[in-house]
Amino acid sequence: MLPNSMSEYITVRRIDDVPSDSRVCHYDELGERAKEAFPSLLEPGSSTVEIRIADGLRNYDCVKYTSYYEIVSE
């Protein structure tokens, strides 16, 4: 269950192989809010973001940051 209607769970996990049909976004192409939130999603236990940030991330399957990270919205 979500903490409130203005948040959404996003899971980010490092992957080594990116499927060829993945929608990949480079970190610097993310919107400002998503750029600010993305590094904190890599920390253990950090998976809740504002719905507007989640909207910017769920358009992609992966984000290229320091490695490739799979984006899963729950």
Image (tube, helix red, strand yellow):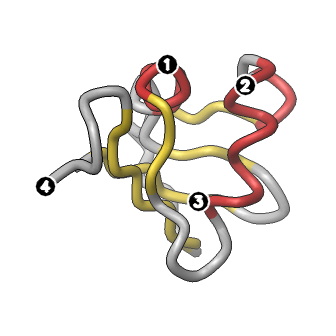
Image quadrant assignment for residue 46: bottom right
* Distance from Cα at disc 3 to Cα at disc 4: 24 Å
The local secondary structure at tag 3 comes to: strand
Residue at 41 percent across and 26 percent down: it is 51
Of the residues tagged 3 and 1, which is closer to the observer? 1
- Lower sequence index among marks 3 and 2: 2
Residue type, numbered disc 3:
Tyr
Q: Nearer the viewer, residue 37 or 6?
A: 6
Q: Which residue is mark 1?
A: 52
Q: Quadrant of the N terminus?
A: bottom left
Q: Position of residue 55 (x, y in %)?
A: 43, 21
Q: Residues within 10 Å of mark 4 (few under 14, many from 20)?
A: few
Q: Nearer the viewer, residue 15 or 55?
A: 55
Pointers 2 and 1 in contact (C-beta within 8 Å): yes
Pointer 1 local density, CA inside 10 Å: few below 14, some 14–19, many at least 20:
few
Label 4 sits on a secondary structure element that is loop
Front label number (4 vs 1): 4
Q: CA distance from mark 4 to mark 2?
A: 23 Å
Q: Which residue is mark 2?
A: 33
Relative placement, left or right, of 69 versus 32 is left
Name the residue at 57% across, 35% down.
24
Q: Nearer the viewer, residue 28 or 2?
A: 2
Q: Which residue is mark 4?
A: 1
On the picture, is 24 further left or further right than 47?
A: right
Q: Residue at x 66, y 75 (%)?
A: 43
Q: Amino acid at mark 4?
A: Met
Q: Secondary structure at mark 1?
A: helix
Residue wearing tag 3: 69
Of the numbered discs 3 and 1, the one sitting upstream in the chain is 1
Residues tagged 4 and 2 counted as in contact (Cβ below 8 A): no
Residue 67 image label: none
Q: Nearer the viewer, residue 56 or 25?
A: 56
